[in-house]
Image (cartoon, rainbow, N blue to C red):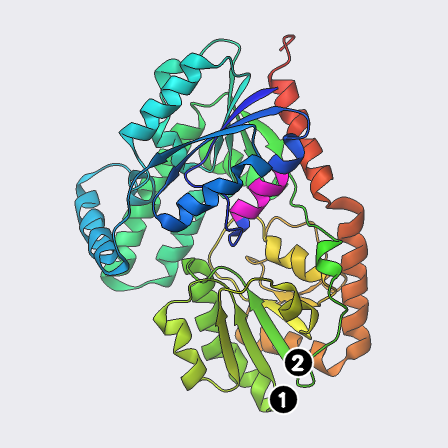
Amino acid sequence: MRILWVKTSPLHPLTRGGDLRTFQLLRELHKRHEITFAGMTADDGQCEGTRQADTYSTRSFWTHEPKCTLKAGRLRFAAGAAANLFSNAPYAVQRFTSKRWRDQISRLLDEHPFDVLLCDFLFPAASLPWNKKRPGQAWVLFQHNVECMIWKRRAAERPGIPGMYLKSQWQRMEQYERNTCRRFDAVLTVSEEDTQTSRNLHGLENLAGHVPTGVDLDFFSEPPRQTAPAPTVVFLGSMDWHANVDAVLHFAAEIWPLVVSRFPNARFVVVGRDPPPEIRALEGTARNMEVTGTVRDVRPFLRSAHVMVVPLRIGGGTRLKIFEAMAAEVPVVSTSVGAEGLTLEHDRHFLKADTPTEFAEAVIGILTSPDMAAQLAKNARIEIAEKNSWRQAAAVLENHLQQLTSPCL
């Protein structure tokens, strides 16, 4: 197949779950198909990331949309959010709209006879040249999340004026998502749960199925597993993502004090890129907390931990971090939202807890019961080893795309 893959940014550095999923799937597809990657760059780091595009694509094309400094970026965000009050489009989509990018994609469609255009996430859809869609060419949306559900959950957590603004963004996102999904020939999700949510919420009739989450089992089996001397609880996730920030702040305020009351020497280690000031401040205000920021390799932190926590209250899609912990033989405690979309069983593959007290008791249970913790980790690793390699996940995506491009359809 000749596939035009459209995404807002390069995949490297591989510090975000969505980028990691796309990279692993594309790396497998690239072995058998012609991949043209069309993306945008916003800063020097992303420009550097384009140099590794040949590891997952046959050719790549980039449209540069400069991003200002962090301070100016915050001002620009505030100005953009204010201006968006008079728009029907959600700000999360509007900020990625680019005429130059649309023109680049249009030229590619004119110059190459693609079998598939795959829009990776919802956001690039605003810059697609819809007038260039040709008969026999499958335009596919790959939905890593049901985006409006993320905004709905954010709005529910914020009172007052911020909550009112988030509610308006949720409502705009729901309408935009519904209308945009219907324009594609097919929509793929990352879980059966997301497929059902999209069908029920948006009334979609073009849902082609889902692509399961994968994990590199061999990669996360190193280095040798050796837990730290003190009970160690780890959180893994990009800390420039609001759902992870909310989760860590919630855990630190409501759950961690209950754990420390039982294990005074326990450590809570937050591993993830670009933590904001409120997360950095936890090191000085919360007991036995460490914030690493960006790390070159997350495996040593996982392989030395006694338990990984996923106290998410906001989010969507599926959690690669859970599979990574399970591949590293680390027991997992998660909320229902955190484990959403994963075909895993509570009390067999992980522990599920949704209130602060339940969550703390689950963490304490793992710390006080090494045999139970080891059995959970063993069961989980066996489960994902049988069903969740990236090669298996890519084969599912490949099959979906081949069915959509079959001349008999």
Question: Is residue 277 positioned above or below 194 on the image?
Answer: below
Q: Residue at x 81, y 55 (%)?
A: 382
Give yes or no for contact between labels 1 and 2 (Cβ–Cβ under 8 Å).
yes
Question: Is residue 349 positioned above or below 169 on the image?
Answer: below
Q: Earlier in the sequence, mark 1 or mark 2?
A: 1
Q: Which residue is mark 1?
A: 263
Within-10-Å neighbours for mark 1: few <14, some 14–19, many 20+? some
**The C terminus lies in quadrant:** top right
Residue type for callout 2? Ile
Q: Which residue is mark 2?
A: 364
Examine the structure image and report whether residue 16 is included in the region drawn in magenta. Answer: no
Q: Secondary structure at mark 1?
A: loop
Q: Residue at x 41, y 59 (%)?
A: 240
Instruction: Indicate the quadrant where residue 84 lies.
Output: top left
Q: Position of residue 289 (x, y in %)?
A: 51, 81
Q: Position of residue 157 (x, y in %)?
A: 38, 62
Q: Nearer the viewer, residue 108 or 6?
A: 108
Task: Say whether residue 371 is visible.
Answer: yes
Q: Nearer the viewer, residue 369 or 4?
A: 4
Question: Is residue 84 positioned above or below 250 on the image?
Answer: above
Within-10-Å neighbours for mark 2: few <14, some 14–19, many 20+? some
Residue type for callout 1? Phe
Q: Position of residue 272 (x, y in %)?
A: 50, 64
Q: Which residues are magenta?
A: 18-25
Task: Say whether residue 358 is visible.
Answer: no
